Image: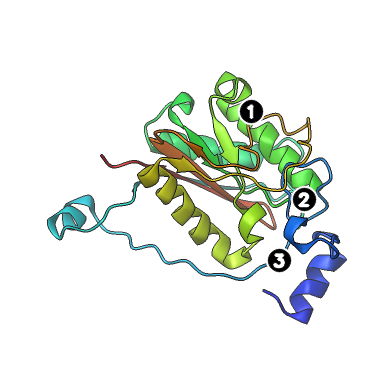
């Protein structure tokens, strides 16, 4: 991720934050002063197996993969479709595949990169799919990229792991560096401090360049 060629490419697309004088505060999804993402590196590994096998061998089960949705809006190489159709389709497919209602989702680990357009489009898509459940702040939404930066190829795996931990531990990670929330991002973004609640079902979003969108539903195992 962090190579001269990669950084030059992202910078040419005006996708990166230019807040070089404030590295700790540069990644600020949903904040009114956000100006792009912070490139980062990391890794995550998730072990997937059947519930029967995991139970039989006494494995520590963090969560169940309950649903999956994907879409491709093919609107623009680096911009989401203005109507959010790709993100909306991905989230709806995942919730339906999990045989849940939108109101069953307790927390969304958002794609939330900190780009001016992307964050607004994702929040609008969330409001479209989850309606009053999101509008009245019963649904919590946060971006862990505010903490980790954008891990690019590793982001989906890492954020699925964070979502699984939220199910297991009942702690929702915050969106840090939210000094003034953008009113166009009209959802509860869990600003700056983690929160505790029983998390039954989590949606994890990963929306890539070129309009490729994936959403996972992870569910708590009691």
**Which residue is under mark 1?**
127
In terms of image quadrants, where is residue 167? top left
User: What residue lies at 56% left-to-right and 27% top-to-bottom?
Assistant: 130
Q: Position of residue 69 (x, y in %)?
A: 49, 44
User: Who comes first in sequence, dot 3 or dot 1?
Assistant: 3
Q: Position of residue 84 (x, y in %)?
A: 69, 38
Q: Which residue occupies the extreme front position in the image?
A: 193
In contact (CB < 8 Å): disc 3 and disc 2: no
Mark identifier at residue 115: 2
> Is residue 200 rendered to the left or right of residue 140?
left
> Is residue 34 rendered to the left or right of residue 50?
right
Q: Residues within 10 Å of mark 2 (few under 14, many from 20)?
A: many
User: What residue lies at 22% left-to-right and 51% top-to-bottom?
Assistant: 51
In terms of image quadrants, where is residue 186? top right
Q: Residues within 10 Å of mark 3 (few under 14, many from 20)?
A: many
Q: Position of residue 52 (x, y in %)?
A: 17, 52
Q: Which residue occupies the extreme bottom position in the image?
A: 4
Mark-to-mark CA distance, 3 and 1: 28 Å
**Quadrant of the snapshot with the N terminus:** bottom right
Q: Which residue occupies the extreme left position in the image?
A: 56
User: What residue lies at 74% left-to-right and 48% top-to-bottom?
Assistant: 75
User: What residue lies at 78% left-to-right and 30% top-to-bottom?
Assistant: 183
Mark-to-mark CA distance, 3 and 2: 12 Å
User: Who comes first in sequence, dot 3 or dot 2?
Assistant: 3
Q: Describe the element under mark 2 as helix, strand or loop.
A: loop
**Quadrant of the snapshot with the C terminus:** top left
**Which residue is under mark 3?**
39
Q: Can the viewer see residue 93?
A: yes
């Amino acid at each position: 991720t962090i190579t001269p060629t990669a950084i030059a490419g992202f910078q040419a697309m005006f996708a990166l934050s230019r807040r070089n004088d404030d590295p700790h505060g540069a990644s600020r999804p949903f904040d009114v002063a956000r100006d792009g993402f912070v490139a980062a590196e990391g890794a995550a590994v998730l072990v997937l197996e059947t519930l029967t096998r995991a139970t039989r061998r006494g494995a520590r089960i963090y969560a169940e993969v309950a649903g999956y949705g994907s879409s491709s809006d093919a609107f623009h190489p680096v911009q989401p479709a203005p109507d959010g159709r790709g993100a909306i389709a991905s989230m709806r497919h995942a919730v339906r595949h999990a045989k849940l209602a939108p109101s069953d989702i307790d927390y969304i680990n958002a794609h939330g990169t900190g780009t001016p357009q992307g964050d607004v489009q994702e929040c609008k898509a969330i409001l479209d799919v989850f309606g009053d459940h999101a509008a009245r702040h019963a649904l919590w939404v946060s971006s862990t990229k505010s903490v980790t930066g954008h891990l690019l190829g590793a982001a989906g795996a890492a954020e699925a792991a964070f979502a699984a931990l939220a199910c297991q531990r009942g702690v929702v990670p915050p969106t840090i560096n939210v000094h003034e929330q953008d009113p166009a991002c009209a959802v509860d973004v869990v600003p700056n401090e983690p929160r505790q609640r029983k998390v039954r079902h989590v949606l994890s979003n990963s929306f890539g360049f070129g309009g490729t969108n994936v959403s996972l539903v992870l569910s708590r195992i009691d």
